[in-house]
Image (tube, rainbow, N blue to C red):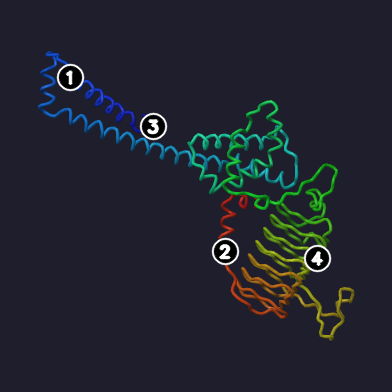
Amino acid sequence: MINKKNKTYFFVVISFICIAFIVGFHILDGRNITLFDPIIKYIKQYHIKDVVNIVAILSGISAILVGIASIRISNLGAVKEYFQQGDNKEYTTARHNLYKKFDENVPIDPNDADASNTVSFFHFWGLMVKKKYLPFWVFKSASGYAVIRLYEGLQEMIEIRRVDNPEYAEYFEWIYRKCRKVLKCSEATNPVQVEKKQNEETSFLSESELKTIGFLKYGTNVLVSRKASIYNPEQIVLGDNIRIDDFCILSGNIKLGSYIHISAYTCLIGGAKGIILQDFVTVSSRCAVYAVSDDFSGEQLNNSMIPTAYRRVIEGQVILEDYVSVGTGSTILPGVKLEEGAAVGAMSFVKHTLEGWKIYAGAPCRYVKDRKQNMKQLRTALQNSCVYEESR
């Protein structure tokens, strides 16, 4: 690789001069031309030919080494430029806007500026990878899942554009297919998408319906079943990547983080004290989580239809920290805290705080064994995939 910037050409020129000198010497030495006898005699006397041989070899080796270094430097420069452009506000905003449109099932217009910018960006860098100017590990370690999600979300728009330009986004498609093959993606690795046909209802509420309900706040990729019941929505906060299944009941002060699944027939009764579910929490089907309850001692009347003067209400904030899992049919009482990584087996009764990264089961629940913490490393991998970061 001859590169004037790093003087590689200088070593190549020297090598050619030395080779020409050696060839010329052998041609003259093999012919009976008396005119050059003094020159040939001088060269042999002082071993100039050997010196030239050595110089030619060293120059050639130097050119190879400098060429290799040049390739490495240019690759590192390309990697740096890729990440600098990827962090450009215009491109990050375009990707964020597209993710939101995907989550809301908004059709992508063929002339959408965000889509055009994104396609152009990955088309160029796909070309750079295919031509070996940019190493593929950049996409394998950082942007691969983002490439997959963006291409699949924009595929219909790309096909429309290809009617006029058959080569449109050719290298974007190439890097997409390479990412899918190397990362071994399946449907399960992709963010959950809800297909919505025109004039046809889906199992989950649409974006406009979520707004109509009147949640205090909600994020992206929020899937709430049409068969779920929501009370006091003005007190409920939903983060990103939330799924609430059929026949769930959410009532009162409730705050959900991100990457949470509330399975069918589960109820969360937040009351005034509230229920907090942090990130990566799973609550299985037919569970009950109470931040408010009646006194069942018999000293007072109980149920919500009794005037407060005749009943005693027990309240206490319930917190489920990161990575908590609650097995099917379990009940959690007011004031309970499940620390990071705690897991509760099926049909358990939880009435006191549980330590983190341990597994509990029973009624009342008791310690069973310690829980592995691999989830932390998987969360880091998800964060590094960009899908996690840009959806928040």
* SS for dot 3: loop
The three-letter amino acid code for the residue at tag 1 is Gly
Mark 3 neighbour density, 10 Å: few (under 14) some (14–19) many (20 or more): some
Mark 1 neighbour density, 10 Å: few (under 14) some (14–19) many (20 or more): few
- Measure the C-alpha gap from mark 1 to mark 2: 76 Å
- Measure the C-alpha gap from mark 4 to mark 2: 29 Å
Q: Can you give x and y, in whole percent of width and height, for residue 283 in the image?
A: 72, 66
Which residue position holds label 3?
Answer: 1
**Which of disc 3 and disc 4 is earlier in sequence?**
3
Q: Can you give x and y, in whole percent of width and height, for residue 196 in the image?
A: 79, 45
The three-letter amino acid code for the residue at tag 4 is Tyr
Which numbered circle lies on residue 265? 4
Name which quarter of the figure residue 24 lies in. top left
The three-letter amino acid code for the residue at tag 3 is Met
Which residue is located at x 80 percent, y 77 percent? Answer: 313
Which residue position holds label 2?
Answer: 374
Which residue is located at x 72 percent, y 76 percent? Answer: 348
* SS for dot 4: loop
**Which of disc 3 and disc 1 is earlier in sequence?**
3
* SS for dot 1: loop
Q: Can you give x and y, in whole percent of width and height, for residue 133 in the image?
A: 48, 36
Which residue position holds label 1?
Answer: 30
- Measure the C-alpha gap from mark 1 to mark 4: 99 Å
